[in-house]
Amino acid sequence: MPISLKKSHRPIESLSREAWVKAAQALIAREGVRAVAVESLAQTLGVTKGSFYWHFDNRDALIRAALEAWEQDQSADVVSRYGGISDPRRRLRLLLFAAFEDQENGLIFAALAQSGEDPRVAPFLQRATERRLAFGVEAFQALGLSGAEARQRALLAYAAYTGYFQLLRATPRVVQDVTDLSGFVHHLADALVPART
Amino acid sequence: MPISLKKSHRPIESLSREAWVKAAQALIAREGVRAVAVESLAQTLGVTKGSFYWHFDNRDALIRAALEAWEQDQSADVVSRYGGISDPRRRLRLLLFAAFEDQENGLIFAALAQSGEDPRVAPFLQRATERRLAFGVEAFQALGLSGAEARQRALLAYAAYTGYFQLLRATPRVVQDVTDLSGFVHHLADALVPART
DNA sequence: AATATACCATACGCATGCGTATTGATGTCC
DNA sequence: GGACATCAATACGCATGCGTATGGTATATT
């Protein structure tokens, strides 16, 4: 009965594989899916292709792994953190502010949308978009709006959200002329969330 | 004294060059800048590379030509068609409706934003974004808003605009659940344009 | 000590895609 | 009809990037 059992024999996921996935994610976030090249990635990791093809079957497997890992901790996504708030008005406003404040997540999503034409990315993007919009629709319905109206506002809110980060990503200089972001979001929230039940 | 002078000698721009540019634009709009490959383009045009390198110095020249041609008839862009309207409220609302209705232009712009990481595209995108935002800021200022507030609203409007078309491009199925687009824009306009002077 | 496993390097084949060089066909002008 | 310009086909060199094959080294197990 070995006590110090399987230290490096089965770390279940051999550590270095994680490094590949993370590097791929970083590259996707910065330059899009098409920039994921195994040889250049290997160089930044200080190894060669020989390593890569031991950990992964091929390039697609790496991209898939990166996207799946990204989708997994979507549980940490903003929409998941505000399901518990009961007052629908409060929930919506908090959600809006939190969404615009989480630049990390917003920019990653914008980067992914940028690679949205890629057939590997499309389904992930689709699912995430549906999930987020559905959350918005529910929240607006909980506010007393009809289904059609709730869909309208959710789309409006989400378009503003995704458009903002797209602009921030593509032309940051232009966006940063708007110094008061909270005022920006405040106005959006006031416009979308009715003043009274 | 030749009467039928210079029919094909100097059409000033040798006709076929236009074809290359248009094909490149179509490809950029559909699949992004990186998809512009001279050999595949040549095939779709029914010729070979030999032709291309007579019309253009290299691939970059084609991309530049396509982007410049696109920027040229930005004079046909929505913002240029509504400068004449004197009533600022009316001007803004018309502009908003026209912008969301012109799907052609909106989708092309979304496609370009998708290739915004490309150093060739970036300056064009930057200029267009600045132009459009500046127009919005002016319009909101004409409405009596302060500079800071005008910038906020212009950014909000433009984020919603660009975000909408990004969503329409990336995940059309999800967006088309919102059947009443005019209601969508109507709400946006009401939210952004103050009711009274 | 011997063998097996995990990880990585090197070297190759192959496809794609850019750019060049050369040649050819079809006009236009004198 | 000969010279020149316009447009295009063919063939090549070269780089990048994917995937494979094979061998090497370190650690672990027995």
Image (cartoon, coloured by chain):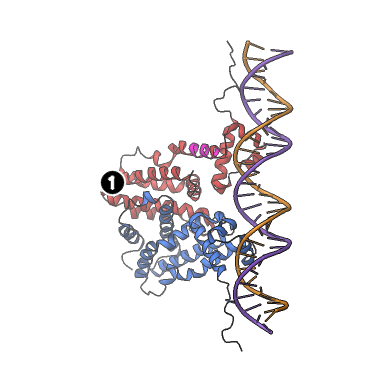
Chain colours: A blue, B red, C orange, D purple
**What residue is at 48 percent from the left and 68 percent from the top?**
A74
**What residue is at 42 percent from the left and 62 percent from the top?**
A104
Furthest residue in direction bottom, as rendered = A1
Q: Quadrant of residue B139?
A: top left
**What residue is at 64 percent from the left and 66 percent from the top?**
A54
Image height check: is A34 above or below A85?
above
Is A34 on the left or on the right of B43, as rendered?
Answer: left
For this rendering, which residue is in front, A79 or D30? D30
Residue B80 in picture, x, y percent from top left: 40, 39
Numbered circles on residues, count:
1
For this rendering, which residue is in front, B31 or B39? B39
Chain of the residue under the numbered disc 1 shown in the image = B
Quadrant in the picture for the N terminus of chain B: top right
Is B81 on the left or on the right of B171, as rendered?
Answer: left
Range of the magenta residues?
B62-69
Image height check: is A108 above or below B58?
below
> Residue B7: within the magenta?
no
Task: List the residue tagged with mark 1.
Answer: B141
Is A65 on the left or on the right of A95, as rendered?
Answer: right
Residue A48 in picture, x, y percent from top left: 60, 60
Image height check: is B172 above or below B80?
below
How many other residues sit within 10 Å of disc 1, few (<14), some (14-19) or many (≥20)? Answer: some
Image height check: is A13 above or below B14?
below
